[in-house]
Amino acid sequence: MDRRGRSLLVVALVVLAISAVVPATAAATTPATTTATSPATTPTNHSTNTSLGCVDGICHDDPINVTQVDGLDDAERDRLLARSMARVEYLRGEPFTESVPIRVVDSETFGREQLTANDSDPRFARWNDQVWKALFIVGDNTSTQTAITDTLTGSVNGLYSPRRDEIVIVADDPAAPRISEATLIHELTHALQDQRHDLTSPRFSGDTQDADLAVTGLYEGEAGYIEALYRHRCDDDRWRCQRASPTSGEGGASNRGILTVVLQPYADGPGYVHEIVTTEGWAGVDERMTDPPTTTSEIIHREPIDPQPVDPPSTATAGWQRYTEPGRNGTEVAGEASIFVMFWYQATTAGADTVDPGTLYESEGEYDSRTYSAPPSDGWAGDALVPYRRGDDDGHVWTTEWETAADAAEFHRAYTAILTARNATETDPGIYELDDDRFAGVYGVERDGTRVRIVHAPTTDGLRELAPGLTPSATTEQIPGFGIAGALLALLAVGWGLAWSATRPRD
């Protein structure tokens, strides 16, 4: 899976206790690796064959006589893997058709493999740096690729590679690992998905950050949902479960903004899948695996949206050049989830008056662990983020579209609150200079109805060169269509005792 055209790079890494699907095209077996093959499983028809939920003579509710105090030997690992496969079959109602190899590596080997697998074209790296700078998550003098790798690889427990058709478990001692059964359940769900839907298909790889997070929310949501169902059966003693802690994955995230973006599919995905299963059954999930969601808004709000096409023409002058290969013809779509994280991260790290940082940790249901919804990011209807370069200079033009003018005004307000919190100087209405900061440069912010355009360049002249028609807007500017007439209507509403609001209702 070619990551050069996508800004997230390693979105599918296993983070903390959460496991995932990742490509491992460059992974190589080293002496610090042990490999085992899963027990044989005979394809079954679950509607007619009662062997569904039994693999290699071990069924989903059988004891397996495994202890992990001193790690697993090969025979114990085989029994644990067989029962885990049986449990995935039982919970998902579908059989495995092939065995699933499992490979155990140490964290050093895993990190080396991921650095190699995610090595990218320098042109993409520079483009990608601008994407994450625009989101106020990774600033100047920091490689986004390095920041992502450093943030995630120290917290990895395991992954499933659809290109190699194998599970990789990270352990301190590959010869005698302790393996969480929950991790195996999660990874084996991905293996089952791969056998049924081919996870190497292009439809499971978005060409923008938002699309990639959205489709990840689908397949990680299913794996997380199956894992949650497994944990329920363990908690109420219907199953005896291996609760051993893994012997890796204890590292901390170096950039919480990156981590929080990557976690969005895992946090919102299980609830999204639960709602589909509740209303449509597993057939509804299979339908979406054939035609995956394309926006994080659909995963967050659990309803499809039809984003507005945002494809601003390139009018840059004075030698500024846009990229043509990364993303969607050089254009990124940040999307609602990443925009929420931008506001949350700057509220957390810079004290910006954007969103309540505690919003993220407000669970919206049994299968949701975090909330990625707040007024400054709600109402997203599309965006296009276009990085530019000229010599050693970088800049970007970010055009966002919103459902209502009130949504656009709220995004505008919260975005300028970031600049204010970082001590930017408003040199003219809507133009901000930010010095001595890892996000340094000049920012021009323009609002017109439901559209907000942000232009960033090293100098004020650069703003006009990147966007000659830029007309910056002060945040105190009236919402279009809500001037004197709007004020009179408000007074009339109060006088008549009407419940009137200028903002869009929220769920």
Image: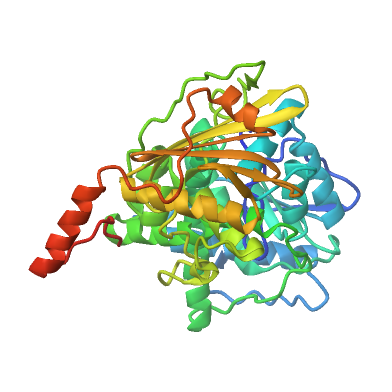
Q: Does residue 105 appear left or right of residue 307 in this picture? A: right
Give the vertical position of 74 relative to 33 (above or below).
below
Q: Position of residue 406 (x, y in %)?
A: 33, 50
Q: Nearer the viewer, residue 390 or 385?
A: 390
Query: Residue 75's image quarter?
Result: bottom right
Which residue: 61% across, 42% down?
134
- For the C terminus, which image quadrant? bottom left
Give the vertical position of 467 relative to 407 (above or below).
above
- For the N terminus, which image quadrant? top right
Q: Position of residue 427 (x, y in %)?
A: 60, 43
Q: Position of residue 321 (x, y in %)?
A: 64, 19
Query: Residue 7's image quarter?
Result: top right
Q: Nearer the viewer, residue 182 or 124?
A: 124
Q: Does residue 496 appear left or right of residue 136 in this picture? A: left
Q: Nearer the viewer, residue 183 or 402?
A: 402
- Farthest residue toward the bottom? 237
Which residue: 67% across, 60% down?
256
Kindly tell me whether residue 8 is visible in this rendering. Answer: no
Which residue: 65% across, 16% down?
318
Q: Nearer the viewer, residue 228 or 392?
A: 392
